[in-house]
Amino acid sequence: MKLFNQNLPQDASRSSSRSSSIMYAGLLERLEILRSTLRWATRLDRPEIEKLLRQANAVRDEVMQLSHRERFVQAAGAHFGAEAEPTPEQTAGERKQALLARSFVFEGTFGDNPRLLDALEIAEKAAPTDLPVLIDGESGTGKELLAKVVHANGARADKAYISVNCGAIPESLIESELFGHKRGAFTGAATDRKGKFESAHKGTIFLDEIGELPLQGQVKLLRVLQSHEIQRVGSDETIAVDARIVAATNKNLRKLIEAGQFREDLFYRLSVIHVTLPPLRDRKDEIPLLLAYYGDEAAEVLKRRPVGLSPRLRAFLLAYAYPGNIRELRNLVYRLACLAGDTADLVHLPEDIRPGAPAPLAAPSAGPAAASAAASTAGAATPAASLAEAKRAASDEAERACLERGLKDVGGTVAELARRWDMNRSHLQILLKKHGLHSKDFRQAGR
Ligand SMILES: Nc1ncnc2c1ncn2[C@@H]1O[C@H](COP(=O)(O)OP(=O)(O)OP(=O)(O)O)[C@@H](O)[C@H]1O
Ligand SMILES: [Mg+2]
């Protein structure tokens, strides 16, 4: 029986002078040989089956070894013209302009940072394909925003975008949440219920915090990715689903794989296109733009004039390391807009990051940049105990005033306020409790 020569295509893949299309052609050829071997074989002995399996595994491993990016460029190329390719002589500014000129849909702001542009260009090219996208990056770097970019710039933009936080679903409910259930499937299943996958049919499903999905859920998800079919819990009927998958995580999935907490096969299925968002400390050139963007937004939301920044506060904000990334910057700007009069100063910063404050500045993820931010503004704050006390009192008072104003604006709906301020609702509840504020007292006041 003729079996293919393993050496030829592998040699080809080692040769850096050959293009990836030649490598793919080689892989396809090997697959075809495998297929025809299987198709025409009248009888296969065990050793032959094992040999074929080894060859199939070798092809699979090679596909995985090829860079994710290359794979997706190949696929996306068919959908997207060559004009999307940045030419080597294009400056970052030109790349940004080109993105905008192509009517790139993005609900935020971005400048000329090459790493961010890389991520946005990948997302833009991936969008028109149905390939799965995995987005990773630290908390607050914009993963969810990027997932929406993939959806909004693709052919499914006018279809459903369903977001699932895999970390927030109790293990026992995951299957029912993702795939739905039949009435009576378990205690409490009073009616038939559609799952998130069915709701995302023809659209996009965003699997957030995918690293939190328990192993059992991973097995079930893998099955759906392979078969494009789901079964509601308690039902034998299979339902075809066509949902484009975008997943995100702030965990290092490769490390989770090593620790046996994440399935490698699922990782490869999800990460055909793998985008990593850089932390804000690695794209500090974007900070002025983000400060302006959120300064305007905060002024509009809080119905006030945009707040000015004192030179030393601006110096701090430009140098600070933002361990919470863009979310932290956004919250800081809202805080300043809420607490300050015409001009915000260092005193309006949260105490734990304020220059001159003792330990918290040295938080591990804040890194040396935060320390240098502190140093660059050193002398601006005096760590005298009584002054610190006075500042704390002032800060508390301002915090309370801000909470009152916020609650008034949303008519006492804490969930809405948490959404507007991009805060965790339970954290907001804790703050309300700290100040003895009751949301019900604001129910009539706001609207
Ligand atoms: N380029 C950007 N321009 C403007 N705002 C941005 C940008 N990137 C992220 N943001 C904002 O930062 C905040 C955090 O973004 P997002 O929720 O997408 O982060 P995340 O990476 O999903 O965080 P987490 O891992 O904590 O879920 C959001 O308010 C988002 O709108
Ligand atoms: Mg997120």
Image (cartoon, rainbow, N blue to C red):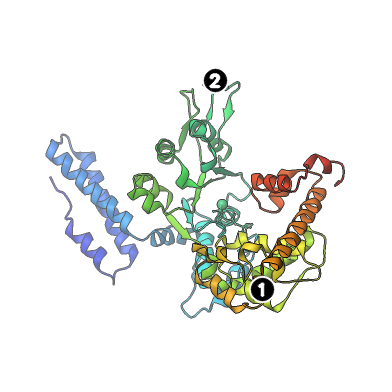
Instruction: Locate residue 270, reporting x and y percent.
Output: 43, 49
Answer with left or right where residue 43 lies relative to residue 16. left
Residue 239 appears in the figure: no
Instruction: Locate residue 410, reporting x and y percent.
Output: 79, 47
Residue at 78% across, 52% down = 406
Residue at 27% across, 49% down = 32
Answer with left or right where residue 33 lies relative to residue 129. left
Q: CA distance from mark 1 to mark 2?
A: 61 Å
Q: Nearer the viewer, residue 227 or 196?
A: 196
| Element on which disc 1 rests | loop
Q: Identify the amino acid type marked 1.
A: Thr
Q: Is residue 244 above or below residue 149?
A: above
Residue 413 appears in the figure: yes
Residue 380 sits in which quadrant? bottom right
Ligand 1 within 8 Å of disc 1? The answer is no
Label 1 Cα neighbours within 10 Å, binned few <14 / some 14-19 / many ≥20? few
Q: Identify the amino acid type marked 2.
A: Thr
Q: Which residue is mark 1?
A: 382
Instruction: Locate residue 340, reporting x and y percent.
Output: 77, 66
| Element on which disc 2 rests | loop
Q: Is residue 86 above or below residue 299?
A: below
Point out which mark residue 198 bears. Answer: none
Q: Which residue is mark 2?
A: 187
Residue at 33% across, 67% down = 19
